[in-house]
Image: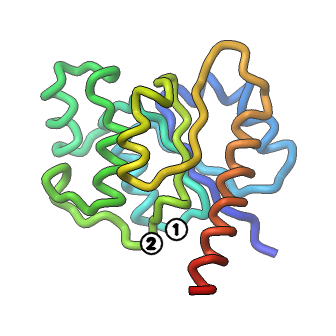
Amino acid sequence: MKKPSVLWIEDSARFELRNLVGQLFFGGKYEFNLAEDVTSAVNQLQAREYDAVIVDIRLPPGIDAEWRKLYQQTGFDRVHAQLGLKLLRWLLTRDNSIHPAAPPEWIKPHQIAVFTVEGKGEIQTHLDDLGITVFRQKSAGLRDTVLLELIDELLARAQTTFAQDRAL
C-alpha cells in the first residue's frame, strides 16, 4: 500500500527537524518532503501531487523573480510579506496577479494545513476565504508529535471531504 505523501513548506525546518520530524521518520507512515522557500515549494507542487501540504505563513521567496518581487515590495520582511498566504491564494484562487504561472490543478483546500507562529485570529479571515480548516500555531514547548498529529488530522479531514464529495 502506498504511503500518503506530505510536503512541509517551512523556512526554518532544518532547525525544527530534530524536534518535529523525528516522529514522522520513526513512524514511517508518510512519504515526507520539505521545501524551504516559495520557489522550491512551487517546483515540488508542480512536479507531483501530495496528499497533504503543510504551509508556514512567513516564507522567503527563493529564486523565482516574481516571488522575489512580491517579497521586495514589503521591504524584505517575512513578517509583513506573508508569502505563505500569497502562495495559498495563488494555489487556491488561481490569482495570476500574484504570479503569472498557472498553479497546479490538483490542489484543494482540504489538502492544506497552516502551521505558523501567527495566531489564528490574525489570519482566520484569510483561511476562511480559502476554505482552509486545519490550523496549528507554533509556540514554545510544542510536543514533538505536533507535526505528526497535524498531518493525521489533515488526512482524516481530507478523506472525509473526499467521501462527501463522492456522495454528492
User: In screen coordinates, is 123 left or right of 96?
Assistant: right
Name which residue type carries label 1: Glu
Residue extending furthest toward the top: 140
**Residue sitting at x 55%, y 47%:** 113
Residue 148: which disc? none
Q: Is residue 126 above or below residue 143?
A: below
Q: Would you say residue 34 is visible in this rendering? A: no
Q: Earlier in the sequence, mark 1 or mark 2?
A: 1
- CA gap between label 1 and label 2 equals 7 Å
Res 42 quadrant in image: bottom left
Residue nearer the viewer, 35 or 132: 132
Residue nearer the viewer, 123 or 64: 123
- Find residue 123 and report its horizontal and vertical position in percent: 40, 33
Name which residue type carries label 2: Trp
User: In screen coordinates, is 38 left or right of 73?
Assistant: right
Find out whether the residues at labels 1 and 2 contact each other: C-beta distance under 8 Å. yes
User: In screen coordinates, is 78 left or right of 8?
Assistant: left
Residue nearer the viewer, 143 or 64: 143
- Find residue 16 and report its horizontal and vertical position in percent: 64, 25
Res 47 quadrant in image: bottom left
- Find residue 131 and report its horizontal and vertical position in percent: 44, 55
Question: For the N terminus, which image quadrant?
Answer: bottom right
**Residue sitting at x 17%, y 19%:** 75
- Residue on which the image places disc 2: 106
Q: Is residue 138 above or below residue 107?
A: above
Residue extending furthest toward the right: 27
- Find residue 40 and report its horizontal and vertical position in percent: 40, 47
Residue nearer the viewer, 130 or 23: 130
**Residue sitting at x 86%, y 47%:** 27
Question: For the C terminus, which image quadrant?
Answer: bottom right
Instruction: Report helix, strand or loop for mark 2.
Output: loop
Q: Residues within 10 Å of mark 1 (few under 14, many from 20)?
A: some
